[in-house]
Image: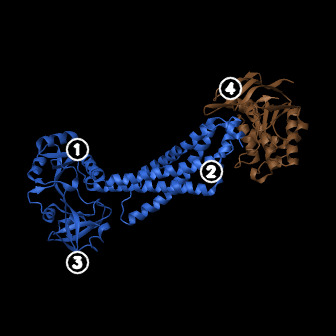
Chain colours: A brown, B blue
Amino acid sequence: MSVAISVRNVTKSYEEGSTGTLALAGVDMTVSHGEIVLLMGPSGSGKTTLLSIMGCILRPTSGEVILEEMNVTGLDEKQLPSVRLKHIGFVFQGFNLFPTLTAGENVELTLQLKGMRSKQAKEEARRLLGLVNLEEKYNSFPADISGGQKQRVAIARAVAGAPEVVLADEPTAALDLQSGKTVVEMMARLAHEQNRAVVIVTHDNRLIDYADRIVRIEDGRVA
Amino acid sequence: MPPLARRNLFHDKVRLAVTLTGIAFSVVLMVVESGLFQGFSTSTSSVIDHSGADLWIAAKNTVYIDQAATFNERKYYQVLATPGVAQAEKYIVRWTVWKEPNGRNESVQIVGINPDVPLGLPWNLVAGDAQQLKEPNAVIIDEIYKQKLSANGIGDHFEIRDYRAKVVGFTNGIRAFTTAPYVFTTFKNAQDFTGIAEDQTNFVLVKAAPGVSISALRTELQARLPENDVRTTAEFSGMTRHYWMFTTGAGVAVLMAAALGLIVGIAVVAQTIYATTMDHIREYGTLKAMGAPNSYVFGVIMTQAAIAAVMGYAIGMVVSIFVVRGGSMGGAAIVLNWQTVVLMFFLTLAMCLCAAVVSVRKLMTLDPAMVFKG
């Protein structure tokens, strides 16, 4: 399997008044295409910070981020959004769907931001919702579907435009047991069948069975 | 693109109603106040603008029509003798007192003219004729002021400065900026009505001969009449408007109210669009995290502002038309012309887009990492 994303000796410190907080203290990690990796660890250990750096949302204080063989560490704030748009999909704990858009339009929006034409985006959005078994919810607004269904729409949105990397932050935290299981099964299938690199930050031990690998973070270091 | 801007704007109907009410109120305020300004401004100089004259000769340092000193009518003959003058006529504008049969007094402005010369004649006549001013003690007033002057119809008699006056005609829409209505009469009657001596006049109106340069004629007349001011009609009209609108504070007050409308509009729209933006802040953070360019986020906010502007403008303009019509029936001079309609549209659009800048600034600096917090 080829490497999709890797971080090398990454540190991240936050300035807080006259003192600083070291969130990551030299992390090395690699995720390959077709691999699903769980990032686990106690609260405040640096999991979400690492996910944000891998997602090109935060820039590391030092170290390197290599995404699809491209060193993105030195890219500035104007260049990073286009990298995220092209290469990375996100799934959030709170779903973060646009409540005024239908499920289909939520997916369409991502596709059109990536440059797809309207008609083609509609067809593709319908296909992607079909992948998460929600084609019939195309015209439903997020308020009218369940939490599990919302997260499945979020997955369809995350994979819209075929990004190589999908990053998920506690995707099952707001879901019941069955819905959480369905969501993670879909993400695992996504990784294995569509050859995506999937990284999931979670506290949920029930997801361990679906992971190819587990990376534990403690005090800003890989344990 | 899916219509995110429109959906976000229409999502909260109550907030949208508040936004549109604020914009419409602002539009009405701006239209009415600017219309009042134009109406006032037009009425201050209406007798100048409708005089048909090219040049106005007045006493030295006369800055507006309503308070001109008199000068000897000998100058009138000097004007007539000047090459390039096609017509010239003596003209009086002066305040005096109109006495009603019941003893009540009203201030009026006498306009003294020569009915045989087409300079300074009353216009928009709806009853009677300027030639009827040749009848003894004849006057023409505007029907807007019928009630104010207790004039029921043609033939009614009044007293002006102890001289008898008879109404022989009515005009329509000749408003006075002050509370004193215009009363048209002959030059001779005007002298009696205002107490101006027989050899004196307020103004001499001049019509240039065809092909004669008005500028050159003015220079020539000014050289021949160094103790008088010679103004073009446009210049004297502008001076009169400026005097009433800016040195008395009347125009400034109206303009201030119009500006207030603009400020109220900006404040209301800024507040409501900002509140809408903050309601959807997590969504905008998600958009930025996903990699949406700032230009897209900017477009969403500006589209919301533009939609609100168009809707608020439409509502405001409909209300304004009713207010203007109501104002006209009530005696207020509110001008609403197509230039104002177009100007207000762009002003409203600019107002709403400016108001959206606060929200745009907030989103441009929004940290997409916020999507991972809580």
Quadrant (top left/top right/bottom left/bottom right) for the C terminus of chain A: top right
Residue located 13% across and 40% down the image = B223
Q: How far apart are marks 3 and 1 (CA)?
A: 50 Å
Element assignment for label 3: loop
Kindly indicate whether the residue at mark 1 contacts the one at mark 4 (C-beta within 8 angstroms): no
Image position of A208 (left or right of B25): right
Task: Please name the amino acid that badge 3 sits on.
Answer: Asn
Element assignment for label 2: helix
Task: Please name the amino acid that badge 2 sits on.
Answer: Leu
Can you see residue B43?
yes
User: On residue B210, which mark appears?
Assistant: 1
**Front disc: 3 or 1:** 3
Q: Nearer the viewer, residue B304 or A37?
A: A37
**In the rendered structure, the residue with mark 2 lies on which chain?**
B
- In the depicted structure, whether residue B125 falls above or below residue B366: below
Task: Please name the amino acid that badge 1 sits on.
Answer: Pro
Residue located 75% across and 31% down the image = A50
Q: Mark 3 points at which residue?
A: B102
Q: How far apart are marks 4 and 3 (CA)?
A: 94 Å
**Front disc: 4 or 1:** 4
Q: Which of marks 2 and 1 is nearer the N terminus?
A: 2
Task: Please name the amino acid that badge 4 sits on.
Answer: Thr
User: On residue B9, which mark appears?
Assistant: 2
